[in-house]
Image (cartoon, rainbow, N blue to C red):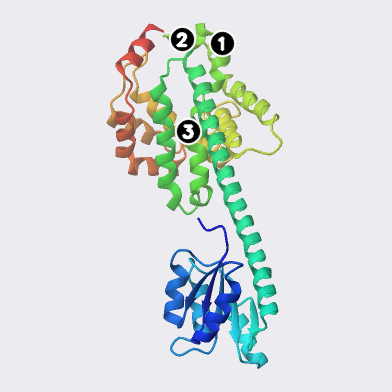
């Protein structure tokens, strides 16, 4: 690796190349080129120059065009160019600056002026390179820490959702299925004129990650009710319904611990609180109807009901896919948002594929049967 700066000298005069080369040799490494084509090739060849001294008046490709091409190439645009010129018209200097030069040195060349200008621009280049390297390092560090935060966030979600599952009749595969249903349905709706603007890619990713927390409030429901194989009494059902508020309150408490609003927690709170609401207002806990139900909760409602239907539980056998689809379609405009049901009907095969891909394992089914 070169520790000394590298200067490329470009001039069609052998005398200039020799004089400038001899002057700079004790201060830096030098490379030479006698025409524009060679200059462009030499600028790309190792060692890449830190500075280019470029004659303007050359046969073939002149210095202005060489500079223009250097600045148009991402590989060389960062290299400062100083023009060596016998031209004295101010319009020539203006053209030189327009194509990207940083300075002009007039011929005949003053050795002291040349050395001072080169030192100045090499120092500026070194400072710019240092800042660029620092910025790259900082960007990489921010990206690394962001990945760590996302990994920790994902693990926390899974841990919290798994905690709820250990007390419920659900399985780990239920988490994977429902979050994939939500994502598939949301992506289908991206082309919808009314709902599409609410479902950009970043929002869908947050919905995918927050979906596993929809039943986190069930950790607060007594086992006698949560695991009861038969029908719940009205009093027991009232307690069961409180899991929506319990989940909502737990996430609100988490939100209070951070300084800035969290999109992820916002969606998790909505889903936990409102996924049992129904389009016609007959759901719980608030009896919301229609568009008053957040889109996140409406998506979760379709995903959760479909998965509950197709899954085996201690209190029921699995319902076949076709029959489950029929039940969802029957709920159009009553239980579910009509637009979501229409989208679901279009991608019902994708729901089935997700269900098959994340089918409960024999161990999960056996553990569920023991509850």
The Cα atoms of the two marked residues, 3 and 1, are separated by 26 Å
Q: Nearer the viewer, residue 64 or 298?
A: 64
Q: Which residue is mark 3?
A: 300
The Cα atoms of the two marked residues, 1 and 2, are separated by 15 Å
- Residue 217 seen in the figure: yes
Q: Which residue is mark 2?
A: 227
Near mark 3 (Cα within 10 A), the count class, few <14, some 14-19 or many ≥20, is: many
| Lateral position of residue 29 relative to residue 316, left or right | right
Query: Residue drawn at (62%, 64%), measured in percent from left and top?
Result: 125
Local SS, label 1: helix
- The residue mark sitting in front, 3 or 1, is 3
Q: Nearer the viewer, residue 105 or 198?
A: 105
Near mark 1 (Cα within 10 A), the count class, few <14, some 14-19 or many ≥20, is: few
| Lateral position of residue 348 relative to residue 81, left or right | left
Which callout, 1 or 2, points at the residue further toward the start of the chain? 2
Please give the label number shown on residue 352: none
- Which quadrant holds residue 118? bottom right
- Which quadrant holds residue 302? top left
State yes or no: discs 3 and 2 in contact (Cβ < 8 Å). Answer: no
State yes or no: discs 1 and 2 in contact (Cβ < 8 Å). Answer: no
> Image height check: is 329 above or below 240?
below
Q: Which residue is mark 1?
A: 235
Residue 69: x percent and y percent?
A: 48, 77
Query: Residue drawn at (33%, 25%), measured in percent from left and top?
Result: 310
> Image height check: is 350 above or below 69?
above
Local SS, label 3: helix
């Amino acid at each position: 690796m070169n520790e000394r700066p590298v200067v490329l000298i470009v001039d069609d005069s052998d005398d200039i190349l020799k004089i400038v080369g001899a002057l700079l040799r004790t201060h830096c490494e030098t490379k030479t080129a006698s025409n524009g084509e060679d200059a462009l090739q030499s600028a790309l060849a190792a060692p890449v120059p830190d500075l280019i001294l470029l004659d303007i008046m050359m046969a073939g490709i002149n210095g202005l065009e060489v500079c223009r091409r250097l600045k148009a190439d991402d590989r060389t645009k960062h290299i400062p160019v100083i023009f060596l010129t016998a031209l004295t018209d101010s319009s020539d200097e203006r053209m030189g600056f327009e194509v990207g030069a940083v300075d002009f040195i007039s011929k005949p060349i003053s050795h002291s002026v040349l050395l001072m200008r080169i030192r100045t621009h090499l120092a500026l280049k070194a400072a710019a390179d240092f800042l660029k390297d620092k910025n790259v390092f900082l960007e990489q560090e921010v990206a690394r820490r962001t990945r760590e935060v996302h990994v920790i966030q994902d693990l926390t979600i899974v841990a919290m959702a798994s905690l709820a599952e250990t007390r419920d009749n659900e399985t780990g595969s239920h988490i994977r299925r429902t979050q994939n249903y939500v994502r598939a349905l949301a992506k289908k709706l991206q082309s919808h004129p009314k709902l599409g603007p609410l479902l950009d890619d970043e929002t869908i990713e947050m919905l995918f990650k927050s979906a596993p927390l929809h039943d986190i409030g069930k950790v607060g429901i007594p086992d006698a009710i949560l695991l009861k194989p038969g029908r719940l009494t009205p009093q027991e059902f009232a307690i069961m319904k409180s899991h929506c508020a319990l989940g909502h309150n737990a996430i609100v408490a988490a939100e209070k611990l951070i300084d800035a609003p969290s999109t992820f927690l916002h969606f998790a709170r909505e889903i936990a609180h409102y996924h049992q609401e129904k389009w016609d207002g007959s759901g719980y806990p608030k009896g919301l109807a229609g568009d008053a139900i957040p889109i996140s909760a409406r998506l979760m409602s379709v995903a959760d009901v479909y998965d509950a239907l197709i899954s085996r539980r201690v209190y029921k056998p699995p319902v076949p896919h076709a029959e489950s689809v029929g039940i969802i379609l029957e709920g159009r405009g009553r239980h579910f948002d009509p637009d979501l049901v229409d989208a679901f009907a279009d991608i019902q095969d994708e729901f089935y594929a997700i269900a098959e891909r994340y089918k409960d394992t024999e161990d999960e089914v056996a553990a569920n049967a023991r509850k």
